[in-house]
Amino acid sequence: MDEEHPDDMQIDERIMNAYAKLTPREKQLAEVVLRAQSSLSSYTAAELADTAGVSAATAARFFRRLGYSTYNEARLHSRRNAGWGSPFEHLQDTLQQAGDFHLHVAQDSENLSRTLETMDISRIEEAVGYMAQARRIWIVGYRNSRALAQYAHMLLLNFSSDVHLLPRDAGASLGEDLASIRPDDTVLVIAMRRRPRVLGEVVTIAREAGASVIMISDPTLGETGANASVSLRCQNKGAGIFDSMVVPISLINHLCARLVATKGAALKERLAEIERLHERVDDLSSAISVQDLPNFPSVSGD
């Protein structure tokens, strides 16, 4: 392994490090490798190349660019690191970094920068378009992603009351809610690692119902995201044993901020009513005057 790609760097990290230098065909292959990452050792180089629609020579060059001498080396490395994502797996390696706040902040800054370098901004606008046109928005999040889903739910309730968080609670059956998804709905799926198997089935059911699916995930998103209408990958490497959620939080905030520009007068009316009700039930310490609400543009713009 060279200095740019140390042995403990996972393949998705290597891809993100090299992404800006990849050719268009190499980027096609990178997408396939990211989807197959969790089971990379079960694929041959030819199978990956065929799936991506690239030549064997492109595949060989791609893996060398990632710091591997051959694809077999990449496959063996992936197999050795199959437990990546577990805090236990990172415990020994990060004990010496505990308490280093400068390193913690630096890693979050790097995650933001790398995400900005690799994310297609047009996909963000496409996601905003789906949310703006949706009759109803469903938000799905499990495990670490649950808190992110709750944050998105809180923000989106400013736009409409027809926003629903799934799974609702431990006593609720998911089937009843999934049966209510319609073609003019949008399902926002927060899928940061480590993802439960049920998440892939939820996405499939939503797409079978004709709904658009927006997925916010980390770079390790595999086949779970294959059916998504829009997939937005966030860098999430943590300085310690836990993943960083700074980028997905920022992305959710940005999506909702962009949605403001598409709602115009209707949003101002709803926010004004919310503020009037805050004042009436006195549930906030200092409500603003509804007259102070700005005039929002009726169409999106830069």
Image (cartoon, rainbow, N blue to C red):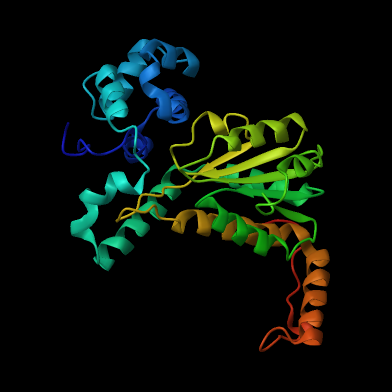
Residue at (26, 61) in percent of width and height: 103
Whether residue 222 appears in this view of the structure is: yes
Of 69 and 157, nearer the camera is 157
Left or right of 266? Residue 175 is: left
Percent position of residue 175, x then y: 75, 39
Q: Give the quarter of the figure containing the C terminus.
A: bottom right
Report which quarter residue 15 is drawn in. top left
Percent position of residue 224, x then y: 55, 32
Residue at (76, 82) in percent of width and height: 278
**Residue farthest to the front, as pictured:** 171
Residue at (26, 27) in percent of width and height: 77
Residue at (83, 71) in percent of width and height: 269
Measured along the vertical axis of the image, is residue 189 above or below residue 299?
Answer: above
Q: Give the quarter of the figure containing the N terminus.
A: top left
Percent position of residue 97, x then y: 21, 59
Percent position of residue 106, x then y: 30, 60
Whether residue 298 appears in this view of the structure is: no
Report which quarter residue 149 is drawn in. bottom right
Measured along the vertical axis of the image, is residue 91 above or below residue 99?
Answer: above
Of 106 and 207, nearer the camera is 207
Report which quarter residue 179 is drawn in. top right
Of 174 and 144, nearer the camera is 174
Left or right of 63? Residue 145 is: right
